[in-house]
């Protein structure tokens, strides 16, 4: 009997231990965040026992942030969802709620939200709008590692040495050229060593092929002019003063006008309402300065074509059309928002999704991230897209940006029409910009 009581006592102790272990597993309640940011909760009821459950770690406190974007909708919402899913692998405690608006409405909506105290925690800004938002003090300072980005890209989204946004994506402009026309004219294809003189010589040779063939095309408007001026060592502003009418800027504008006046570039009348892109596809232009967003459209061309980094005169200069992402200075979740912004703009996972989707390009220095992009067969020299980042031209920006652009464009149109000289156009532009700065 004594041995029997001992056995029953041991069995009773083992049963109590088993019950305690089972109770510890059953009372832990799991909460996870899905890729789309929703929460799911285990609703199973814990078993009731007379023993105390083993202690478990408290789940990380969850936080929800709002992200406002203009570039994702409508074509890249699925890609953004994939980025959020990858982000939640690292930060399951942060839910990202996406809000979108069309570009033409976006900044009005954003300004209204900020003025009403309802700003999203994180939001997109293009470079042209960044300065005005940063100057108004509505952006939070970002204390993050920027070593993986192209330096000029991060500098574009800093103000007075403080990082207020991170570069998300960029697009650029290249020199597209018709290889068949170059061959017919006996001209070597453009190289990285080309200058304006080389471009002009090629344009002259190609224009000589016939009355319906022109050597080149570059629009004479605000966006092309500030970049061409930079290629000649001139900018709209120097040491805080308006310098758009300095000799190097006048020389740059005269170079652009001469291409039209000397028959190297078609006039508006000669174009007859046909766009420059259509003329290139039709085989009427030897070269065209336009954006990499035209890669797909030019696939229908029946001739061989390729791209090169734009030549400069005294220095290089390539467009840098960039979007960045900022954190609201009024956000109550700035730390979580900064984690999202850093991942969206700087992680390999987000960068790969962006490249694979042809959703512009990330501004990261890791060459391996661009393998899929560079391996596409056309154009052959896609490397020129990355090479263009070595000498980027940042758009001149003031708070009254749209008014400055309109003023400059109107004066450039008069210069193209021959109503005023290059010097007169830029003298008047200087006066107009100075007035806008008051």
Image (spheres, rainbow, N blue to C red):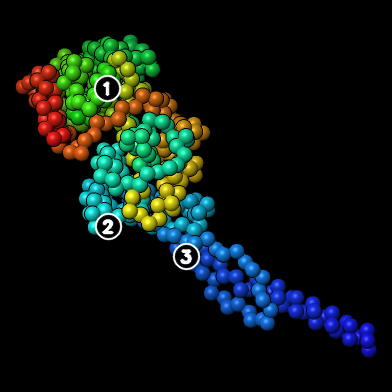
Quarter where residue 225 is shown: top left
Q: Regarding mark 3 in the picture, which secondary structure is present there?
A: strand
Is any atom of residue 198 visible in this view? Answer: yes
Query: In the image, which is nearer the foreground, mark 3 or mark 2?
Result: 2
| Separation (CA) of disc 3 from disc 2 | 27 Å
| 5 vs 220: above or below | below
**Residue 279 placed where, x, y %?**
23, 27
In this rendering, the answer to whether 416 lies above or below 14 is above
Q: Residue at x 63, y 79 (%)?
A: 47
Which quadrant, please, contains the C terminus? top left
For the residues labelled 1 and 2, the Cα–Cα distance comes to 40 Å
Inspect this view and state whether residue 228 appears. Answer: no
- Of marks 3 and 2, which one's residue comes earlier in the chain? 3
From the image, tell me which residue sits under label 2.
117
The residue at which mark 3 appears reads as 39
Other-residue count near label 3 (Cα within 10 Å), few / some / many at <14 / 14–19 / ≥20: some
């Amino acid at each position: 009997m004594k041995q029997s009581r001992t056995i029953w006592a041991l069995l009773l102790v083992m049963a109590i231990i088993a019950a305690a272990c089972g109770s510890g597993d059953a009372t832990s309640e799991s909460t996870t965040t899905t890729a789309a940011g929703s929460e799911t909760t285990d609703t199973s009821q814990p078993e009731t026992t007379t023993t105390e459950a083993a202690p478990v770690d408290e789940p990380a406190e969850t936080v929800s942030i709002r992200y406002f974007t203009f570039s994702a909708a409508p074509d890249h919402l699925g890609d953004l969802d994939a980025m959020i899913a990858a982000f939640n692998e690292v930060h399951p405690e942060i839910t990202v709620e996406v809000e979108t608006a069309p570009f033409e409405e976006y900044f009005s909506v954003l300004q209204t939200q900020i003025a009403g105290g309802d700003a999203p925690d994180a939001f997109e800004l293009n470079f042209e709008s960044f300065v005005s938002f940063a100057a108004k003090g509505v952006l939070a300072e970002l204390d993050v590692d920027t070593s993986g980005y192209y330096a000029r890209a991060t500098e574009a989204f800093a103000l007075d040495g403080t990082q207020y946004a991170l570069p998300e994506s960029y697009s650029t402009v290249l020199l597209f050229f018709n290889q068949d026309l170059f061959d017919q004219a006996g001209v070597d294809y453009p190289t990285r060593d080309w200058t304006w003189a080389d471009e002009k010589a090629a344009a002259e040779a190609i224009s000589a092929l016939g009355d319906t063939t022109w050597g080149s095309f570059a629009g004479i408007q605000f966006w092309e002019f500030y970049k061409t001026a930079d290629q000649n060592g001139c900018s709209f502003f120097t040491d805080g003063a308006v310098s758009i009418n300095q000799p190097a800027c006048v020389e740059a504008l005269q170079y652009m006008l001469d291409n039209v006046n000397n028959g190297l570039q078609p006039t508006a009348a000669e174009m007859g309402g046909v766009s420059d892109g259509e003329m290139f596809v039709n085989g009427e232009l030897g070269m065209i300065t336009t954006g990499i967003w035209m890669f797909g459209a030019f696939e229908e061309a029946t001739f061989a074509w390729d791209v090169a980094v734009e030549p400069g005169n005294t220095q290089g200069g390539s467009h840098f059309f960039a979007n960045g992402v900022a954190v609201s200075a009024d956000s109550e979740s700035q730390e979580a928002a900064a984690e999202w912004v850093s991942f969206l703009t700087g992680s390999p996972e987000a960068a790969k999704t962006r490249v694979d989707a042809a959703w512009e390009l990330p501004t990261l220095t890791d060459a391996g991230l661009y393998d899929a992009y560079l391996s596409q067969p056309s154009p052959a020299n896609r490397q020129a897209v990355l090479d263009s980042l070595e000498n980027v031209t940042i758009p001149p920006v003031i708070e009254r940006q749209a008014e400055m652009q309109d003023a400059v464009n109107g004066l450039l149109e008069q210069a193209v029409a021959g109503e005023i000289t290059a010097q007169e156009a830029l003298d008047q532009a200087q006066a107009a910009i100075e007035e806008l700065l008051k």
